[in-house]
Amino acid sequence: MHRSEKVWLTLSFGMIMLFMLATGYQSYALEMGPPSNMETIDPQKVDQTAPFDNPGVKQIGDNEYEVVMTLQVFSFNPGKLEFPAGSTVHFTLTSKDVVHGFQVANTNINAMVMPGHIQKITQKFDKPGEYLVLCNEYCGAGHQMMATTITVK
Amino acid sequence: MATVPHSLNDKSVTRSFKEKTGKMLGVNPQDAKFTKTYMFVAFAALLLGGILGLLQGLNRAGFMELSPQHYYQVLTAHGLLLVVVFSGFFCIGYFYAAMSHTLGGLLPKVRKMAWTGFALKIAGFVLAVIPILMNQASVMYTFYPPMAASPVYYIGLALIVVGIWLCCFGAFIQVANWRKQNPGKHVPILSFFATGVFVLLFFGSVPVAIEVLVLVLPWSLGWVDTINVMLSRTLFWAFGHTYVNIWYMTAVSAWYVVIPKLIGGRRWNDTLTRVVVIALVIMNITGGFHHQIIDPGIEEPIKFMHVFMSLAIGFPSLMTAYAMFAVFERTSRRQGGKGLLGWYKKMPWGDVRFLAPMIAMIGFIPAGAGGIAQSTNQLDQVVHNSLWITGHFHLTLGISVALTFFGISYWLIPHVSKRVLTRKMNRFGVVQTILWTVGMIFMSGAMHTVGLFGSPRRTAFTTYFDNATALSWNPYMTLIGLGAILLVIAAVMQVYAAFNLMFFAPKGEEEFPIAEAEVGDVTGYWTERWGLWVALLIIVVAMAYVIPLTDMIVNAPPGSPPFKTW
């Protein structure tokens, strides 16, 4: 093997390791890991199961909110959310039918929402404005209409 | 600068030599017919899939009305035609031609198996398309449960898988037979690639076969009430990502073996080439997990381990990057090229057989970099299910794979059709390649960018009730539409070229370009230990999947009934 190739391959390996370290540091030290909640639920009894029997927004602290939300063809319940700027919002999500995606444009909120599984994701909203919430997993004929907004004041 | 294809360049010198080898090796007419048929299906699928792609591009750009229902039908068919039919048929047609050429013709038994496989795949495809046309299967080629298509759709997919298996077993028999008759010899390099590809085709499709036959089909037929959604999805991606990497590996075979010949050089180190094949075979299947980085029901440590499993596949590609540029430099220095970038001047840019796969390789630099970025956890979260991903695989499949396949078609189709690539057709091919490239740059570039802003994939035209954020994406959508127009023109040209080279081009002999190994390049026989490679493949898959799959089965929530939401 040529010397330059050894150098190249060492660099390549080093780069991959660096990616691993960065990902690990972010996941475990900074707690920025991807949404991976492990709780499950009977997908046919979402309406009867707490907390989804009572979806909505609950203030749980100073500038801290919990949103319990169901996703179903082709809507988010509750929709049209409003928070004061600087709020930290914890979303607890599940699907009542098919696979959906929960994405808020211009934030890092992006999570798969599966029937049978409860997904959780948290976001701090600093900048005021209207945020577009949309489903990013094809879920049927009205998929392109499945959207709502979060207004931060 | 050499601007003429090699075969046209020094015709008189090579003619007599070619005639001799032609008589000795020549194309077996029965094998040629097999590859020609596969190519015919592949390019017919490209035409149809390309036109459907245009419809989507025009719709998303807002140039053309398409009801959402039709959009999703078109999208399902576009994916199936291009990802399953075009790539799949091309790959098998090409490697069967390679095996026929380098292993002394296909065995009659193998030919029969491969034709049976062909019949099953066509039957399966027809069965899959009927429910799509009847609006009974707008579930995309990923068919995530609990969306449920007509059972006929799944039966079609199962038949396609069985057809592919027959082609795999045919290839295994062919290679095993050659090895028995040539003890101690290395399997010729293209057939070595073929072995790797068919091993992956087989093992990669086992998970999806289990998904379809054990989980989805009984459920869609109503024999069981509910399905395990996560399990199905995980089995799908163990297959899905492997398959796109198989098409990539097919392209890589031409980069290592064909391109050096076209530039008048020799191959890269034979052992390292084989190591790349082996590494891709062993590590590929577990890469599928990075499609599930933001799924619930998979623990973070598992996801972290899978970042490594995914990034590991990048390593052989980085070996390839070095190898390719080293071959260019070495070849050009032998031809009198100077300096680090002197190779640039010595390359036959005017030869479509070189130009198309060369652009394909260059395209893999950003494509591979994007792939590495988006398989790390947090970066994936930024782009997951956005148009960025669509942009990514239009770069990997649309540039790196498709352009290599196009480049191959300009010599493989005339080779098996006993016709020649004329100067005129070569120029036509150069124009077509450039058009395709520009179209892809527009489309893939715009998709990557707007995906970063949050525009989702697999979504019909929408402004989300005139939302300001969504409206700001519109200029990029226009670029996607423009790219689609250029692409469909290039696709039609490519299909014209393929059919012309198959049926109408002047008769003659077109070379099957295979570069020689360097003089004195000795390969360790250990590379031939396929039993060991398969064992390692199974161990890696077990390391990656046993824990999460067990977890998904043991701790499964109550299942989901079928839904038809379109």
Image (tube, rainbow, N blue to C red):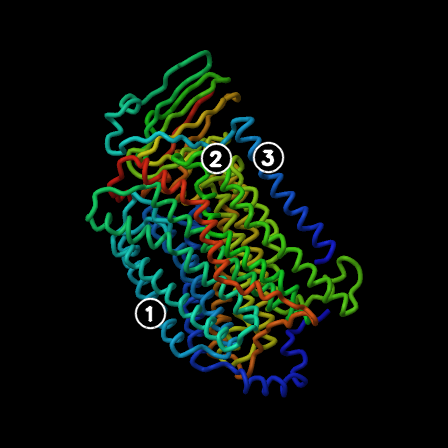
The foreground one among A150 and B467 is A150
Residue B319 located left or right of residue B472: right
Label annotation for residue B119: 1
Please name which of the two marks, 1 or 3, marks the residue nearer to the observer: 3
| Residues tagged by mark 1 and mark 3 found on one chain of the structure | no
The amino acid beneath tag 3 is Ala
* Residue A47 visible at all: yes
The foreground one among A138 and B328 is B328
Separation of disc 3 and disc 2 at Cα? 15 Å
Separation of disc 1 and disc 3 at Cα? 49 Å
Q: Which residue is depicted at the point 28% across and 51% down?
A: B214
**SS assignment at label 1:** helix
The quarter in which the N terminus of chain B is drawn is bottom right
Q: From what the image shows, is residue B426 above or below residue B212?
A: below
The foreground one among B391 and B430 is B391
- Pointer 2: residues within 10 angstroms few (<14), some, or many (20+)? some
**SS assignment at label 3:** helix
Name which quarter of the figure residue A134 lies in: top left
Q: Disc 2: which chain?
A: B
Q: Which residue is depicted at the point 65% across and 47% down?
A: A12
Q: Are marks 2 and 1 in contact (CB under 8 Å)?
A: no
User: Which residue matches tag 3?
Assistant: A22
* Residue B467 visible at all: no
Q: Which residue is depicted at the point 34% across and 62% down?
A: B162
**SS assignment at label 2:** helix
The amino acid beneath tag 1 is Ala
Residue B535 located left or right of residue B115: right
x, y percent for residue B61: 46, 46
Please name which of the two marks, 2 or 1, marks the residue nearer to the observer: 2
x, y percent for residue B500: 49, 75
Q: From what the image shows, is residue B516 above or below residue A17?
A: below
